[in-house]
Amino acid sequence: MSKFTDHLWQDLVREHGPTLAHTDRPDPGRAGGAGVLRRPRVLAGSTLGLASVGAALVLALSGSAAPPAFAITTNGDGSVLVNINRLQSLPAANHKLTAMGIHEQVTIYMATGPAAVSGAVTCTPGPGAGQPRPPVKVLVGTDGTEVIGSGQSGGNTGEGTFHLARCTVAPDTDTGPGTGNTGNTGNTGTG
Amino acid sequence: MSTETRELVKAMRERPVAARARSRGRLPSSPLEEFEQVYLRNVDVLMGYFARRCHDPQTVADLTSETFVRAVGGFAGFDPRRGSDRAWLFGIATRVFARYCEQSAGGKDAAARLGGYRPLDEDEIEELVERIDAERAGAALMRRCERLPAVERAAIELVDLEELTPKEAALALGVSRVAFRKRLSRARSRLRKEHHSDE
């Protein structure tokens, strides 16, 4: 490596090493990972719930070897990353947040076109809500942009390129398990 | 941060370059090591991508840094079963560069545009100047493509210069494979016509 690339790597590890060390990764192709490192609390979901997201887009996101519908990671700094791979799983992800003792419910707003900036989006407080505790970030797909090709939309009309325009978080008013998500996502189904 | 994590991070930061090189190609034992392999496989080509676009070493360094910082943030969502790490990183790099151009056009200075990464020392500047020089041929090809639409130019660059497969390039640009192949074919055809008309 050149001096610059060596220094850049050292900077990355110094500033982001702890985050990377606790990043949850897909298992195939890796050996020994789970046994070597303490893994973060990651809950993978597969339930397909009901969703009404943004402009009523219900999208079956691309990918033949499908990753988990969603994953929730608690980071070392106490913040929470909600990675949504199938938008229909948002109600289930909200349920899981409640089950984890995080009484915040996430609402996401999708827009057409690729994301201007790759990566997770930090959620802002919903109407009338205070600052979320813990802070919540949402990542849609692998880098914030999802391309839904012909035949991949699960029978819906939402085909094209989409990104997460913003997300909001509001307190969960329903803390009982199995009682359905009555937060601000507009969903009524139990995940 | 736990003691275990702290020790792992320290070891990864301080281990010799030779050890890093050896880790290439072997199955990673941790997400940090996996990211290190992604970094080693791609940092040079990404630097070249920016070196063809910018003549200022500090800007090349900052754009490369910005790409990897964003990659760290999105690593949890990167699934190699859905596409190569190079395609994933080029997808990030194209967005980083587009944002940089937008902000440049808006009159922001370099420090504000990129958030102010570490200034380079003299050796690093020299290395990057050499890299920018080495990319002259690629930069010349890109200048020949200037009259092409941006999407066709990107198609030529990713496949013919960066040697991504059409499938990987399509993923990086966020378009379908069919649409990408059409763009690539159209771009090559236009370049051929221009070449013949120049002769």
Image (tube, helix red, strand yellow):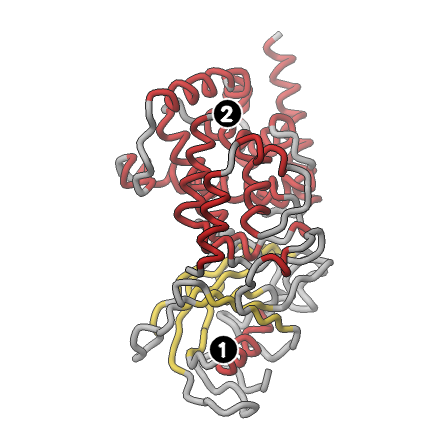
Q: Is residue B166 above or below residue B4?
A: above
B108 on left or right of A111: left
Q: In which chain is the residue bearing label 1?
A: A
- Residue placed at 58% from the left, 43% from the top? B173
**Residue B103 x %, y %:** 33, 40
Say which quarter of the image contains residue A80: bottom left
CA separation in Å, label 2 and label 1:
49 Å
**Residue B6 x %, y %:** 44, 53
Residue named by callout 1? A97
Mark 1 nearby-residue class (10 Å; few <14, some 14–19, many ≥20): many
Please, what is the three-letter code of the amino acid marked with disc 1?
Leu
Residue named by callout 2? B146
Q: Is residue B39 above or below residue A126?
A: above
B52 on left or right of B166: left
Please, what is the three-letter code of the amino acid marked with disc 2?
Glu
**Residue A165 x %, y %:** 44, 61
* Mark seen at residue A5: none
Secondary structure at numbered mark 1: helix
Secondary structure at numbered mark 2: helix
Mark 2 nearby-residue class (10 Å; few <14, some 14–19, many ≥20): few
Depth check: give the residue in front, A81 or B197: A81
Q: In which chain is the residue bearing label 2?
A: B
Depth check: give the residue in front, A19 or A157: A19
